[in-house]
Amino acid sequence: MTLPRFDQIRPKIEAHIREVKDFPKKGINFRDIMPLFTNPQLVNELCVVIADHVRHTVGHVDSVAGLEARGFLFGPQVAIQLGVPFVPIRKKGKLPGATIEASYQKEYGEDIVAIQEGAVKSGDIVFLIDDLLATGGTLRAAANLIQKVGGKVGEAFVLIELAPLNGRAKLPDVKLTTLISYDSA
């Protein structure tokens, strides 16, 4: 069976992304991925295509790490396709037990993300996944977390990139794949 490539699935995904003007505040055009989940077959197809991409471009990975919250919608399914563990990356205080943390700057202050201690081991190759790349702060912090525990980011994948916000510039050392790039934020 030949699996569809990103260029073949992209139009189907784009058709399920809704633009919501002035959300969460005036002047922002929010890209809502939730309509995608009205089509479970398409979500499954997307996760199969992402996993196939990982197999052919990254090769071996030890785990898939997803960023809270929308990275949790795709990450576990991709991990299952690859037969590897899923590692949740959450905001500080949301994971039980000992955690490793990394901070990053947001528009109005600092935020902290965390993983559970031992979830990624030294030498592990990790595939990072999230729904959106905007300014790049959260994805940068996630990559820093993986590196902090001795892991290596094999690749990062985002469903949507808001190109004018130049988040990619914060990730010069991370191979980054984007399914859909918008020229306006």
Image (cartoon, rainbow, N blue to C red):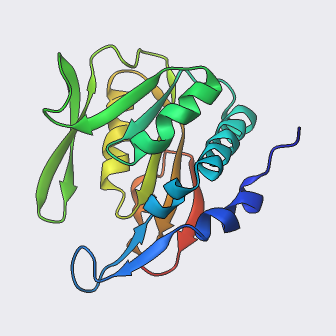
Say above or below: 138 vs 180. above
Say above or below: 135 vs 21. above
Left or right, 116 with respect to 45, comes to: left
Q: Position of residue 47 (x, y in %)?
A: 61, 42
- Between 182 and 39, the residue placed more toward the observer is 39
Quadrant for the N terminus, please.
top right
Q: Position of residue 138 (x, y in %)?
A: 31, 50
Specify the farthest residue to the right.
1
Say above or below: 66 vs 79. below
Give residue 23's quadrant in the image.
Answer: bottom left
Residue located at (28% from left, 83% from top) = 22
Residue located at (26% from left, 37% from top) = 90
Q: Position of residue 10 (x, y in %)?
A: 67, 63
Say above or below: 18 vs 77. below
- Between 39 and 163, the residue placed more toward the observer is 39
Quadrant for the C terminus, please.
bottom left
- Between 169 and 37, the residue placed more toward the observer is 37
Give residue 14's quadrant in the image.
Answer: bottom right
Residue located at (17% from left, 16% from top) = 97
Is there any visible trace of residue 128 in the rendered image? no
Is there any visible trace of residue 173 in the rendered image? yes
Left or right, 99 with respect to 9, comes to: left
Q: Position of residue 43 (x, y in %)?
A: 59, 49
Left or right, 93 with respect to 39, comes to: left
Query: How many numbered callouts?
Result: 0
